[in-house]
Image (spheres, rainbow, N blue to C red):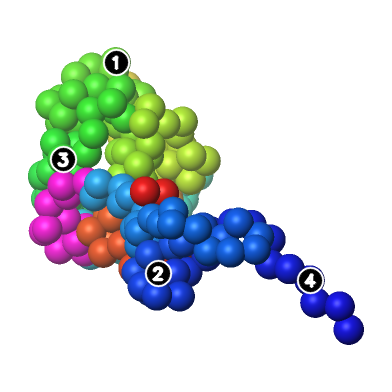
Amino acid sequence: MTSHPTPAGWYPDPEFSQNLRYWDGRNWTSQTQPLYTQPAPQTPQPRLPQNAASLARAIQLLLALTAFVALASAGIELWGFRLIADGVRNPLNIDLDTYSRYDQLHMIAGLISVACVVITGVVWIIWQYGLASRVPRVALHHAPGWHIAAWFVPVVSLWLPVQNLADLRGAIGGARAPSRIPAGYLAWWLCWLGGSAAAMISVPLSLRDPGLSALADATAVEAVGNVANLLAAGLAIMVVQDLSSRVHAALHPDPTAQASAPVVGRG
């Protein structure tokens, strides 16, 4: 059997295991170089706030409560619409006590809904600003201050908040440029705008005409708005969960993803 000679190249030094020695194809030469492992460069972790997870959980609980209130409010408005529509068809059958109960439930549900939105909004803004102030600015369209102001400035509030959240999503994941808006984020935002628009439309409808017909129209619009708010709250929970999972991945990176294979260094 014919043995094949070892080809020329760098091989572990038979005399010193921490070195490589050059084999010229027939003999070991005096050329050596160190053998060492070179870890792969680690991507810098975003300096994200440690309380981001706690705030995200609080927001999700508040959103769940908001969704429940929206569902109850939708049921109250549908009941009220049926009462008022029956009164329009047959005014002689109007029961003032039943109307009074609807009016009281309508007012209580409205107050609770406003309280849920205000409290959720305050916690949301604190959470969002904390993220925006820590991620790389290069991945954001706007400065962290606009992550607060965008919710209140007229006209820009129709679009900027969802764009800011999309930028945060990309920045947390390591993007180096502003991001496009994902479909789920856009669906949440359209539902939120729909619920807000219904709330603004229902008031002029009820004031336009003191009659029951106008009141029935306003009640129907409010019911539709509450359904939109219900969907918006559910989708908002998914948005917060998406961002929260990205924050968790950035704060607690998978060590197996950062493991590096040994690399031969050239001396």
Residue 17: % across, % down: 38, 74
Front label number (4 vs 2): 4
Mark-to-mark CA distance, 2 and 1: 46 Å
Q: At which x and y percent is residue 59?
A: 21, 57
Q: Which residue is mark 2?
A: 256
Q: Is residue 117 visible?
A: no
Q: Element under label 1? A: loop
| For residue 11, side relative to residue 98 (left or right) | right
Q: Residues within 10 Å of mark 1 (few under 14, many from 20)?
A: few
Query: Could you say which is closer to the camera, residue 119 or residue 54?
Result: 54
Q: Quadrant of the N terminus?
A: bottom right
In depth, the one of 225 and 240 nearer the eye is 240
Q: Amino acid at mark 3?
A: Arg
What x and y, as percent, mark residue 224? 44, 44
Q: How many residues crowd mark 2 within 10 Å: few (<14), some (14–19), many (20+)?
A: few
Disc ID at residue 134:
3
Please identify the residue farthest to the top as the structure is shown: 155
The residue stretch that appears in magenta: 46-58
